[in-house]
Amino acid sequence: MNVFFLIALAVLVAFLASAVRILREYERGVVFMLGRFWKVKGPGLILLIPVLQQMVRVDLRTVVMDVPTQDVISRDNVSVRVNAVIYFRVIDPEKAVIQVENFYEATSQLAQTTLRSVLGQHELDDMLAGREQLNADIQAILDDQTDAWGIKVANVEIKHVDLDESMIRAIAKQAEAERTRRAKVIHAEGELQASEKLSQAAKVLAGEAQALQLRYLQTLVDIAGEKNSTIVFPLPMDLIGPLMGKAGGSGPTGVQPTPSAPTQGSATTS
């Protein structure tokens, strides 16, 4: 009698254990009745009918999935290795269980193919400088395709774009050439602005002869301060012409003989 009582008690305990489920706040239970979907339950204490009902747990927290490194050929025929990270979560437990066998594996495979497809349509410069737009494009495609699985892709981030050594050297040469080009353009613009200012200064000096003379004198002062042993300074004739004219008009043109004084002679007698 005691044996049958212990057996009955064990069956009852097993029955209750299989009937009682406790779901956490971030979990939901997809319940099936004789193989057919019945309802989504949780969180908290869940009671199931053993044998007749089965439950599948679904985690609603955001999943951080690392996309393995993918070999991508860009639109300009550059081979790169790219990896990314995806943030997604289940928003419809029923679809996540019924519509796809393993939503985590399915999302991972879809992310890999989408990453190669999207990046293959862009050039290398876009991968290096326009990551925000690429992230948005990949996120939109994944979110649209996983919506039927009850999954929401919140964010996609490209982590690394690895290049081979030859491509890194080529990019470095390109950057150096670009910097050289900018330096030459800036130098040419400076020369153009300086020539315009010099042209304006020349017009001002041409209109005032005294200004040109003062400029020459200032140049002499600057050269004298440089401690040169020999200074060769060209002096234009139009600068010294007025000085020579003034010197020629005020000076004597010839030497005039001075008249001699009369001599005293001896007196004559008659």
Image: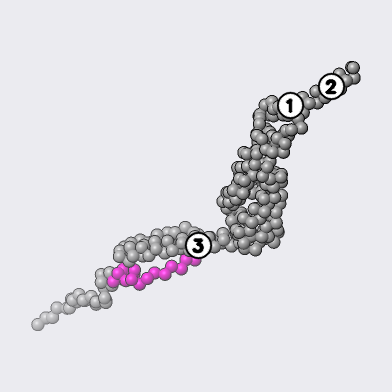
Q: Earlier in the sequence, mark 2 or mark 1?
A: 2
Q: Which mark is residue 20?
A: 1
Q: Nearer the viewer, residue 165 or 14?
A: 14
- Category of crowding for the residue at label 3, using alpha-carbon neighbours closer than 10 angstroms: few (below 14), some (14–19), many (at least 20): few
Q: Which mark is residue 233?
A: none
| Residue 111 image position (x, y, % from top left) | 66, 50
Q: Earlier in the sequence, mark 2 or mark 3?
A: 2
**Residue 56 versus residue 47 in the image, above or below:** below
Q: What residue sits 63% from the left and 58% below the top?
A: 120
Disc 2 from disc 3: Cα separation: 95 Å
For the question of whether residue 161 can be seen, the reply is no
Q: Which residue is mark 2?
A: 8
Residue, far left? 270
Q: Which residues are magenta?
A: 228-245
Q: Which mark is residue 185?
A: 3
**Residue 191 versus residue 5 in the image, above or below:** below
Q: Which amino acid, mark 3?
A: Val
| Residue 96 image position (x, y, % from top left) | 66, 41
Disc 2 from disc 1: Cα separation: 18 Å
**Residue 42 versus residue 101 in the image, above or below:** above
Q: What residue sits 73% from the left and 29% below the top?
A: 49
Q: Earlier in the sequence, mark 1 or mark 3?
A: 1
**Residue 106 versus residue 94 in the image, above or below:** below
Regarding mark 2 in the picture, which secondary structure is present there? Answer: helix
Residue, far bottom? 270
